[in-house]
Image (spheres, helix red, strand yellow):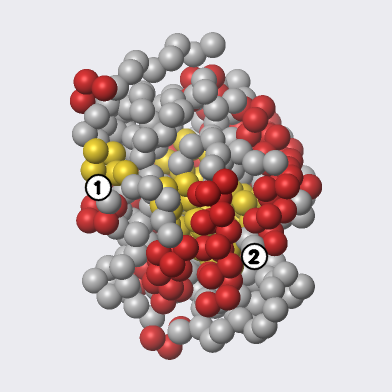
Amino acid sequence: MPPLITTKEALDYGNLTEHEDIEALVERAWEVRRENFGNSTDMCSLVNAKSGGCAEDCGFCAQSRYADADTVMHAMMEPEQILEHARAAEAAGAHRFCMVTQGQGLSKKDFQKILEGAELVAEQTNLKRCASVGHMSVDRAQSLKDAGIQRVHHNVESAKSYYPEVSSTVRYEGRLRTIQAVKEAGLETCVGGILNLGETPEQRVEMAFELSEIDPTSVPINLLIPKQGTKFGDREVMDPWEVVKWIAIFRLVIPGALFRLCGGRVENLGSMHKLAVKAGLNGVMMGNFLTTLGAEPAEDRAMFEELGLNVARQPDNGANPRPDNRSGWLEGEAPGTPMDALIDHQDEAPMWDPSTQLRVVKKGMRTPSYPTAA
């Protein structure tokens, strides 16, 4: 679906500062969201299946070996551990579940654990399955599909013109090659980025239109959480009205994609989550994030329901209007969904909790300096 606004219009919207003007923009984005998706939602949860010790220099991430910040660390989870987190996500009302690892790619041994974990999640839950496991070939993407993965996440992170400030070890062109490999394997794509890395408004618009050209199934929007010791650790969080405004702009540029708000939403939005949903979101990342805590699932579901949106899992696995398409990939019927016994609290459904479940590593003097941007 082509953009509904031009580059100039997007830039003009980016210059809005009056709250009334931003609210009018939100109403336009809300209409577009309802026209394309009705009252359906697409709620996600993730597990940080392999954390810390990353060799790359992405400036926003505490897992990088270049970040002088304490970080959570553990080796690749066993498939049964991945399934445990998936079951907790399902019980909390998530529609889909993403297995996430650090780094540019996985060893054969670790990749096999992701495949086995995906098979268990497909066999023993009614969740849709996603993976975010770094760069990959068409063959690896096909292996993920054969194991029951339906969508692969791989962000571009920022506009191409600003990307050298974000990372020098993970190349922008490599990200595009991975996205193309995922498409060639017949998988859905989840491609987005992070706002507030120091990019200009023009570069935010640039990223939006670059994403429109990529035409992903899903667009996750992340908001920088400034962490001391990372390259962007001295930045301030975004003003929540700015967050809402840019979500609406991205929705108008990419009207046909499923939008979700992920990392940084608690710290950057505060009490304005509901207005952010109206700005064009199909869902949010429920539970916790890669290295930080999130919101209670019950609060997220209530926020969407207050806007007349349906957060219940649908017969097609909660992906309405995009069906599951699992027939032909795996044999057997999907098991029943425990929606009659939803679990809303961390102590009852142990959603991914970085504060208690991971070993925190202090880096100290071992931390090298960030490479200079090309």
Q: Looking at the picture, tell me which residue is in the foreground, 359 or 295.
A: 359
- What secondary structure is marked by label 2? loop
- Whether 152 is drawn above or below 178: the answer is below
For residue 31, side relative to residue 67 (left or right) = right
Crowding at dot 1, Cα within 10 Å, few <14 / some 14-19 / many 20+, comes out as some
The spot of residue 107 in percent (x, y) is 54, 42
Query: In the rendered view, would you say 58 is above or below 101?
Result: above
- Looking at the rendered structure, the number of numbered marks drawn on it comes to 2
Q: Residue 54: x, y in percent? A: 41, 34
Vertical placement of 18 versus 159: above or below?
below
Residue at (42, 41) in percent of width and height = 223
- 252 or 93, which lies in front? 93
The Cα–Cα distance between marks 2 and 1, rounded to whole angstroms, is 30 Å
Residue 239 shows in the view: no
Identify the residue position indicated by label 2 in the image.
148
Q: Residue at x 68, y 55 (%)?
A: 143
Task: Mark yes or no: residue 194 visible.
Answer: yes
Q: Position of residue 186 (x, y in %)?
A: 77, 55
* Neighbours of disc 2 within 10 Å: few (<14), some (14-19), many (20+): many
Residue type, label 2: Gly
Q: Is residue 136 left or right of residue 355?
A: right
Q: Are marks 2 and 1 in contact (CB under 8 Å)?
A: no
Q: Residue at x 72, y 53 (%)?
A: 142
Which element is circle 1 on?
Answer: strand
Q: Which residue is mark 1?
A: 359
